[in-house]
Amino acid sequence: MRSYSLIAPAKINLYLEIIGDRPDGYHELAMVLQSISLADQIDIQSIGIDTISVRCTHAEVPNDQTNLAYRAAALLAQQFPDAMAQFGGVEINIKKNIPIAAGLAGGSTDAAAVLVGLDLIWQLGLTQSELEELAAQIGSDVPFCIQGGTALATGRGEQLSPLTNLDHLYVVLAKYRNLGISTVWAYKTYRQQFNDTYISAAQDLQTRQQRVHSGPMVSAIMHRDGAEIGQLLHNDLEKVALPEYPQVLQLREAFEAQGVLGTMMSGSGPTVFALTESEAEALRVLEAVKTQIANPELEFWTAKFISTGIRLAHS
Ligand code: ATP
């Protein structure tokens, strides 16, 4: 019987630009993704029979084949049936700390952890790029979740260029408990409203790359300049989310009033984050905004920027 415990960090988007259409039907994106210390724990254990089972501590996360952690295990079982026959199936337990449907890639990071854990349990010896190629079949954010740290993500988000480590920065995250924004809704609405700005799927790679405006953000990251990074935070999806969800705008304004380095919605939302240069400042901002808004439905977290993706719990 083999078992592994893995730490699966959440991500935030420091930058999210929608470039246009791709021939494969996905959106062409340019993003800067950042791993943070808020993380799920994934325990994977081999069992004697040829089955995959998933359990999660969060009641709203499905325990069936739609769980992204299950999909990751099923993909490896399909690709490596001999390994499953030799080492048996697996039981996956997810201790959920990352809020769900929050724009923090909670499901994607669980899937990434299962790929890394099963590679060990089934002794597959996959390389980082083989793991990331499999990860891309599960979802666009999954390859980044494996690698982690700070990265520029292009294409549909799966082409990664690692950037400088920013582990001197902290973040406060806030989200209304019962507020969810559908990722599909956010992109569909953006398409309806901003279709005239899209590059067409027929454009070549060079034309796509010329449309990307992430240069100043990448440069600020290379200089590890927290104040500049805070100023350059960008998320195109805010253009559709802020008018529709006043709670997101309210959080943005409350963080801004605290003089943080910068504040932005993460991914397709609805989580809003604020950057600070110390943990003490993150805690001060958290308390100030919590007191100001005083709504029991509002949840807060603080976290640190980290330079790793999936890792073993005891390392
Ligand atoms: P992203 O930032 O990648 O858009 P997200 O943080 O907005 O992701 P998730 O937490 O990954 O969203 O979950 C979105 C939906 O996926 C949930 O409503 C849930 O039903 C389903 N889901 C499937 N597997 C998982 C999982 N392991 N953890 C969380 N949600 C999962």
Image (cartoon, grey):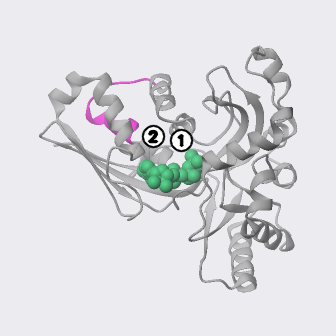
Q: Which of 278 and 262 lies nearest the eye of the viewer?
A: 262
Relative vertical location of residue 226 with respect to residue 251 in this rendering, above or below = above
Tag 2 secondary structure: helix
Say left or right for 174 vs 315: right
- Quadrant of the rendered image containing residue 65: top left
Where is residue 172? Give x, y as percent.
68, 66
Residue pictured at 47% horizontal, 43% vertical: 310
Residue 193 lies, in percent from the top left, at: 81, 43
Q: Position of residue 156 (x, y in %)?
A: 64, 30
Q: Secondary structure at mark 1?
A: helix
Left or right, residue 127 beside residue 102: left
Left or right of residue 185: residue 242: right
Which labelled disc corresponds to residue 112? 2
Q: Residues within 10 Å of mark 1 (few under 14, many from 20)?
A: many
Q: Is residue 9 visible?
A: no
Magenta segment, which residues? 114-127
Placement of 284 over or under 278, stated as above or below = below
Kindly identify the residue that appears in the image at 19 percent across and 40 percent down.
Answer: 51
Does 116 lie within the magenta span? yes
Residue at 37 percent of width and 51 percent of height: 42
- Answer whether labels 1 and 2 touch (C-beta < 8 Å): yes
Residue 121, horizontal then vertical, whole percent: 27, 36
Is 85 contained in the magenta span?
no
Pick whichever, 147 or 295, lies toward us.
295
Per the image, the residue denoted by label 1 is 145
Q: Which of the two discs, 1 and 2, labels the residue nearer the N terminus? A: 2
Amino acid type, callout 1: Cys
Q: Is residue 310 above or below residue 59?
A: above
